[in-house]
Image (cartoon, rainbow, N blue to C red):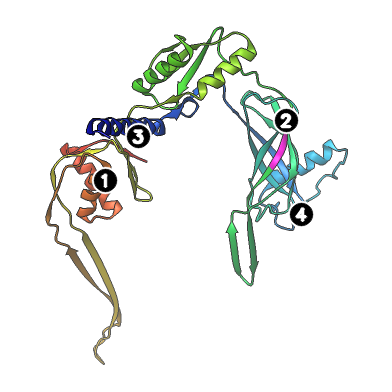
Amino acid sequence: MSRTQKYLILLMWMFAALLVADAARAERIKDLASIAGVRSNQLVGYGLVVGLDGSGDQTTQTPFTVQSIVNMLSNMGVTMPPGTSLQLKNVAAVMVTASLPSFARAGQQIDVTVSSMGNAKSLQGGTLVLTPLKGADGNVYAMAQGNLAVSGAGASGGGSKVTINHLSVGRIAGGATVEREVQTPVGQGEYVYFELNSTDFGTAQRVAAAINKAMGPVATAADGRQIRVRAPLGADERVSFLGAVENLGVTPVQTVAKVIINTRSGSVVMNQAVTLDNCAVAHGNLSVSVNAENAVSQPPALSAGQTTAVTNAQIDIKQEGGALINVRSGANLADIVKALNAIGANPQDLTAILQAMKAAGALHAELEII
């Protein structure tokens, strides 16, 4: 084999590797965007959980539980004598929430989450009584009922208590039956709109180009989030067309450089687009300690003095040396992590350092504090 042939084979292997790498970075359109109008709807309802083993609401502190029981019994033909005081231990007032998926039909079952409203100790072993679930418009879209599954356990005795996981929230798989359908039109007329999960003009242009390459000139990027696609009018043809479009591969453009800082937990997360210029950082910890010692001042005998309590306080201020460290520029995430680790700061101090770097113009990224 000649040197030229070896060179051509090497180029072919490199080109194939680039194609594989590019395909690996590609994402499906269904992962980047959603179809306008295809969405879920939130449902909520108020109900009662019965059958608890003495772990229900304390009715003296949750009068709405007693009122709900009285109303439920009244609807069932049971009239309580006036002035009757109910002391219930096996009933808990709960809020029931569910998500009605798109294209849900009457008779289908959906999962529900049951959460305690009062001071019930546990919902373990309880049964949710028939509860209507309403949407934002006030209409009933589903009815929920069933036995709760609580992923937790607890025990108490002798003033001690041990709890594993959460006992005041349970879930019923397929616990609600859809009673009313929500119309979900897929597009208006001949057009269907794809909406990106995050606004990006470059990605919107690439999505439109990928659709036009596979389906013909049918897609137009309206703005940085929405792509208008001309789709067939027939229901079967439109479903097949959208199914093919959703599975097209698109390589999104690189996102904006961003650093996410969680001040509550001290975590710092940055993406691969973050870059760093040369800068010098001095970091030193300042600690202040106050020690208080109580003593008694005892006067001499026959001095007519009084015994008094005295507090002796000692305040120490200690500051560790903060040498000036040269942080080298980094064009990729690995270099930036290595440079920041060289400072030796904890996550809380790193937050202040990143903010100072941003103010000095050395950190090229958007800081977002959550």
**Which quarter of the image is occupied by the N terminus?**
top left
Q: How far, Cα to Cα, is label 1 from label 4?
A: 64 Å
Q: What element carries label 2?
A: loop
Q: How far, Cα to Cα, is label 1 from label 3?
A: 23 Å
Decide: is 95 above or below 105. Answer: below
Q: Name the residue under label 3.
A: 17
Please tell me the numbered disc located at residue 334.
1
Three-letter code, disc 4: Gln
Q: Is mark 3 on a helix, strand or loop?
A: helix
Label the magenta part by its dominant secondary structure.
strand
Q: Which of 221 and 159 is in front in this view?
A: 221
Q: Which of marks 2 and 3 precedes in the sequence?
A: 3
Q: Which of marks 2 and 1 precedes in the sequence?
A: 2
Whether pointer 1 and pointer 4 mark residues with C-beta atoms closer than 8 Å, the reply is no
Three-letter code, disc 1: Ala
Give the extent of the magenta segment.
173-177
Q: Name the residue under label 4.
A: 87
Q: Which of marks 4 and 2 precedes in the sequence?
A: 4
Q: Which of marks 4 and 3 precedes in the sequence?
A: 3
Whether pointer 1 and pointer 2 mark residues with C-beta atoms closer than 8 Å, the reply is no
Q: How far, Cα to Cα, is label 1 from label 2?
A: 50 Å
Q: Residue 247 location, x and y as percent?
A: 51, 25
Decide: is 141 above or below 362. Answer: above
Residue 213 as seen in the image, left or right of residue 123? left
